[in-house]
């Protein structure tokens, strides 16, 4: 190139040199400008990163939170200055913080959770009570999660910071600041159910927290085939959704609703952020009767429901109720089951083959009753011939009876049992086709109708009347080609005390006659709540009231007109009245040794052979539910009076049995009226020396009235048995 340039014209040579110099000069200038631009860019980037560092860390932490459970609105990490203070802080609602992974070495002299409205933590502030609501000096914390509530209903929007502060040294050990214009999580209003069909409608839905939805004025005619509360994702409801338990935790097809307010809880670990809609959906016809869409980005409080993951070792699992699931595996001629239930320590779980081949029916069913006592677990084989406790009827045991009591075999073999975090888990196995005639065969070539229930055990560890049970058909195919599993985690919210029905006491000295007949025992508000005993399903109604406490005076004579059933062939409705010093009742079901410990005061005489024989068995007078009523809704009635108005009372046209008593000085101060055949149906009789003491004892809540008034109170009663003598 140089030779060619030299061999060319002078002008060309000069031009080449000039061009080279010019290009070199231009290139050097560009490089200097580029270096300046790069330096400026790097400087600006460093400044931006320095300024955005805390925000980036916070954003990163918020991103990380999306992978974990929803805890509320994130405020940030505690700034740590002394004593190893650390943790993440969330706003749960307007008044409450959630602190996750909190650490503090406990070495401060006078240290508290401290908050205020000044620009920075200082002496101007107030103590925030600890997680127990106390204002004690803080102890050591290690990686602890808890909530703090501001005192005196102060709101998070009224403060600027939360700190771990030592009042003695005026020293701030760690703090977090509340952003300006901060909006704490609050319940949010949603839409209303679209009115497509079957009268589905509602007022505005209220999302109370991340798992709980309140629906006001909800209406549905109940005429769908297999209709459920249904949730899922996508623009519109579809068959690809999943069931949502109803307001009582059932997964059955939903009932009729008429402008009712209900609260629904999303199942397992699912939250409102995991769904796009809630539908009233019929899975039989794949039809959406009405739905409501869920808005994005809801700023709602986190749910405080405890979520416990389900654990099962068998390949198939079916969720029967929010608090009960069954899993199974078939191996050769045997099938292994596992029942897992979130039940009380003295509760039983029951599951088995229906008494009918075409529906789920308790009568005739072959079931296991599984429970755990203080020592071990049990799986007991039961046969159900009547919805009543096991009693002897003409020499044969009828009702809910153990197989070995009715001449059969206990076909269940216990494998494992455990109780952990309030959940009973019991596994057992049985042969598919047992040699016991009382056992139902478990079919593998077709589906099986099953039944289930859970409730309390009585004092003899026998199943009392079940508190939870299905109203619809439950079908399970135990021999699927692929494992089936629709189970979800157990959830438990803080229980609120049940408001009991009013307690009735009869203290009128002029009342000497008591009309005793039978009626339903109600739910937790009724017999069970009033007495603290498990229920058999029926209770004594005295003068129109459920199990009133009676006050009788020594030396006076009283008459009970008994209409509890006089047909000994009926295991359900044969209830002679007895009075003993035993609060449980069911004298005839007890062993000879137990009977000898009980003092019988009236209603029983003994044969020459020493066998007890009832003397007050009258015709049946029974208050019962109206047709198609669901007794699982008993607790929806706020008072017994409203509950009683819905009952229909029918009486056999026969004279009642009469039981006359004259309490004397030998009678205890408290005795009990009960059924001769079934336990837990009656309640207290107080034996007093004077009614005057009652009037001056401050018992102003006692109900005082006479039997003619009670006759007027009986709802829809059919007094066929001598109404003139009422």
Image (cartoon, rainbow, N blue to C red):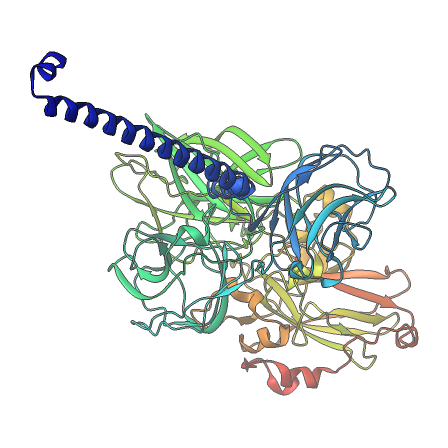
Which quarter of the picture shows residue 540?
Answer: bottom right
Q: Is residue 432 above or below residue 324?
A: above
| Residue in the image at 41% along x and 34% along y | 36
| Residue in the image at 58% along x and 58% along y | 182
Would you say residue 363 is visible in this rendering?
Answer: no
Location of the C terminus (image quadrant): bottom right
Q: Residue furthest left?
A: 8
Q: Residue furthest front?
A: 10
Q: Position of residue 148 (x, y in %)?
A: 70, 50
Q: Residue furthest top?
A: 3
Q: How many marks?
A: 0
Which quarter of the picture shows residue 702?
Answer: bottom right
Would you say residue 378 is visible in this rendering?
Answer: yes
| Residue in the image at 14% along x and 14% along y | 2
Q: Position of residue 288 (x, y in %)?
A: 29, 63
Location of the N terminus (image quadrant): top left
404 on left or right of 551:
left
Which quarter of the picture shows residue 510?
Answer: bottom right
Q: Position of residue 231 (x, y in %)?
A: 37, 55
Q: Is residue 313 above or below residue 620?
A: above
Q: Residue furthest bottom?
A: 724
Q: Position of residue 246 (x, y in %)?
A: 45, 59
**591 and 629: which one is in front?**
629
658 on left or right of 321:
right
**96 and 322: which one is in front?**
96
**219 and 35: which one is in front?**
35
**321 and 371: which one is in front?**
321
């Amino acid at each position: 190139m140089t030779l060619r340039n030299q061999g060319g014209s002078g002008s060309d040579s000069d031009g080449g040199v000039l061009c080279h110099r010019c290009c070199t000069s231009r290139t050097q200038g560009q490089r200097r400008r580029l270096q300046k631009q790069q330096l400026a860019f790097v400087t600006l980037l460093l400044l931006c990163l320095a300024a955005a560092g805390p925000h980036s860390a916070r954003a990163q932490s918020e991103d990380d939170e999306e992978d974990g459970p929803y805890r509320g609105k994130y405020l940030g990490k505690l700034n740590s200055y002394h004593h190893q203070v650390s943790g993440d802080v969330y706003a749960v609602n307007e008044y409450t913080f959630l602190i996750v992974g909190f650490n503090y070495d406990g070495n401060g002299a006078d240290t508290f959770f401290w908050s205020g409205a000044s620009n920075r933590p200082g002496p101007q502030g107030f103590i925030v009570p600890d997680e127990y609501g106390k204002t004690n000096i803080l102890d050591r914390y290690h990686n602890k999660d808890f909530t703090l509530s501001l005192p005196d209903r102060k709101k998070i929007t009224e403060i600027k910071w939360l700190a771990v502060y030592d009042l003695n040294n005026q020293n701030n050990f760690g703090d977090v600041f509340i952003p300006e214009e901060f909006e704490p999580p609050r319940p949010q209003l949603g839409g209303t159910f679209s009115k497509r069909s079957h009268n589905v409608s509602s007022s505005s839905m209220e999302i109370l927290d991340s798992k709980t939805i309140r629906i006001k004025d909800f209406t549905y005619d109940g005429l769908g085939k297999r209709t459920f509360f249904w949730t899922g994702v996508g623009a519109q409801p579809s068959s690809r959704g999943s069931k949502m338990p109803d307001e009582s935790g059932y997964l059955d097809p939903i009932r009729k609703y008429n402008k009712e307010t209900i609260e629904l809880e999303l199942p397992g670990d699912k939250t409102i952020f995991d769904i796009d809609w809630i539908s009233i959906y019929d899975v039989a016809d794949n039809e959406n009767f009405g739905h409501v869409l869920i808005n994005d980005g809801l700023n709602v409080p986190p749910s405080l429901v405890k979520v416990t993951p389900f654990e099962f070792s068998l390949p198939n699992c079916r969720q029967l109720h929010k608090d009960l699931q069954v899993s199974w595996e078939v191996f050769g001629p045997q099938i292994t089951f596992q029942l897992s239930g979130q039940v009380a320590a003295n509760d039983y779980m029951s599951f088995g083959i229906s008494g009918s081949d075409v529906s789920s029916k308790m009568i005739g069913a072959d079931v296991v009753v599984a429970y755990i006592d203080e020592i071990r677990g049990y799986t007991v084989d039961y046969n159900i011939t009547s919805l009543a406790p096991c009693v002897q009827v003409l020499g044969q045991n009828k009702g809910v009876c153990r197989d070995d009591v009715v001449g059969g075999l206990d076909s269940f073999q216990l494998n494992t049992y455990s109780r952990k975090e309030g959940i009973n888990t019991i596994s057992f196995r049985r042969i598919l086709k047992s040699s016991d005639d009382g056992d139902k065969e478990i079919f593998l070539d077709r589906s099986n109708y099953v039944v289930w229930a859970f409730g309390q055990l009585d004092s003899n560890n026998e199943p009392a009347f079940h508190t939870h049970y299905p109203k619809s058909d439950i079908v399970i195919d135990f021999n699927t080609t692929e494992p089936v599993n629709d189970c979800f985690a157990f959830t438990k919210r803080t229980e609120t005390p049940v408001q009991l029905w009013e307690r009735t006491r009869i203290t009128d000295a002029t009342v000497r006659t008591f009309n005793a007949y039978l009626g339903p025992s109600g739910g937790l508000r009724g017999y069970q709540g009033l007495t603290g005993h498990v229920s058999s399903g029926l209770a004594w109604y005295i003068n129109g009231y459920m199990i009133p406490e009676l006050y009788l005076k020594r030396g006076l004579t009283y008459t009970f007109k008994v209409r509890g059933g006089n047909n000994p062939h009926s295991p359900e409705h044969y209830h002679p009245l007895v009075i003993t010093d035993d609060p449980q009742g069911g004298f005839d079901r007890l062993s000879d040794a137990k009977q000898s410990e009980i003092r019988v005061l009236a209603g029983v005489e003994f044969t020459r052979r020493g066998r007890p024989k009832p003397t007050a068995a009258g015709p049946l007078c029974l208050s019962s539910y109206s047709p198609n009523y669901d007794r699982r809704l008993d607790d929806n009635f706020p008072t017994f009076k409203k509950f009683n108005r819905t009952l229909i009372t029918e009486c056999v046209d026969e004279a009642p049995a009469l039981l006359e008593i004259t309490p004397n000085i030998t009678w205890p101060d408290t005795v009990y009226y009960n059924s001769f055949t079934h336990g837990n149906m009656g309640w207290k009789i107080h034996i007093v020396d004077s009614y005057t003491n009652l009037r001056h004892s401050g018992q102003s809540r006692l109900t005082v009235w006479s039997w003619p008034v009670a006759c007027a109170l009986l709802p829809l009663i059919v007094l066929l048995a001598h109404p003139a003598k009422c």
